[in-house]
Image: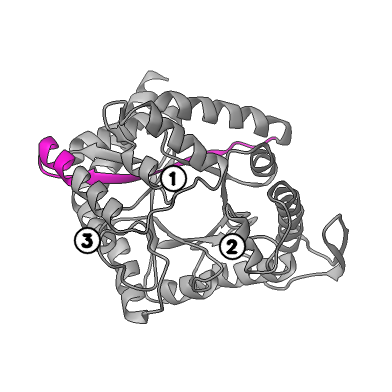
Amino acid sequence: MPVNVIGMIGVAPPQGTALHVIAGGISPSFLREFAQTHETAGFDYVLVGYYASSAEGFTVATYAAAHTEKLRYLIAHRPGVVSPTLAARAAATMDQLSGGRLALHIIVGNSDADQQREGDFSPKEERYVRAAEYLDVMRKVWTSTKPFDYEGRFYRFRDVFSEARPFQQPHPPLFFGGSSPGAMEMGAQHCDTFAMFGEPLAETGERIAEFRRMTQPFGRTPRFNVSFRPIIAETEGKAWDKAKKILDDLKSSGTMPTKAQDKSAERLVELAKRGDVHDERLWMPVAGAAAGKGNTSCLVGTPEQVAQAMLEYYRLGVASFLIRGFDPLGDVSEFGRELIPRLKAGALEIDREIAAAA
């Protein structure tokens, strides 16, 4: 199976060692450069993140897509903020204008406070139920060939029809993440790719097996994504020195979160408590210091060592990796030179081995 590599873009240059890339004002020139650098480096997608205070994702992605040719855009989308009929038309419109370069990452919000900034005071488990209904409506808008009515717990529509159809059929890919029962149930029913934070191989294999079981009643064959922060250098010793400096810089920044906000973050904090290093390359002190927030599971080593570590996840069935560094723009270029070619070549070799053994 082809492996996809996903990065993450922001709209303003971050300062210093960066835990996040979506804060700050809007710099069109930086956004353009950031997206083009990802494309040149060989990334397949970039994630456009979401906060109630951040730049609006569809607009960001549409602008970036106009300045790139092949790079695809995974837009974090929060159900419940706008009508699902409008969201479906917006997604179909961008998918058409970009020539099929859109995917959606469905998020229900790991922060009640951030939800409330947009007027949503619903409890989290209720938001998952609402999101499932929201996605049901979106899929009907994308695929229905005649007007339809809809009666649900959260949404009610009459005579719905959209002339805007997605470029990708039947619709753009849908990603989701989460560890709670509500998240897993929603994803099993509606989403194509289960996105996970980086955990040890054993735990990741268990989560893959569990989610595959959950999708069986719906006749779905899911894909899997894992997120890492690679920390690479020309020697292993230099890579570990670099990792420790990054941790020191983040700790001294005074901006680190102090409390895990959801079950996925809690899992990372627990892993960090169990030990600094897992499976030789998975380094968890940043995740522990950041309360599990911000995709902070690190892989440390030379480019060859980190690529081989990622390929062990590929052997488990992980088809895509979201990777970003702590020097957002510089790391994109370095990953393009040193890491992505090794990862993609290794995945092809594994595919050849599997085909030869079949």
Label 1, on which residue?
A: 291
Q: Which residues are magenta?
A: 219-242
x then y, percent, for residue 88? 68, 66
Name which of mark 1 and mark 3 comes first in the sequence.
1
Examine the rendered structure and indicate whether residue 135 appears above or below residue 262.
Answer: below
Amino acid under disc 1:
Ala
Q: Which residue is under mark 2?
A: 114
- Judged from the image, the secondary structure of the residue bearing numbered disc 3 is helix
Front label number (3 vs 2) = 2
**Where residue 71 sits: x, y (%)?**
39, 63
- Disc sitting over residue 161 in the figure: none
Question: Which residue is found at the position 31% from the left and 75% from the top?
Answer: 30
Q: Look at mark 3 in the image and give the residue it sits on.
A: 330
**Vertical relation: 41 (above or below) 230:** below
**In what quadrant of the picture does the N terminus appear?**
top left
Residue at x 42%, y 66% (from the top left corner): 22
Cα distance in 3D space between marks 3 and 2: 30 Å
**In contact (CB < 8 Å): disc 1 and disc 3:** no
Q: In front: 200, or 172?
A: 200
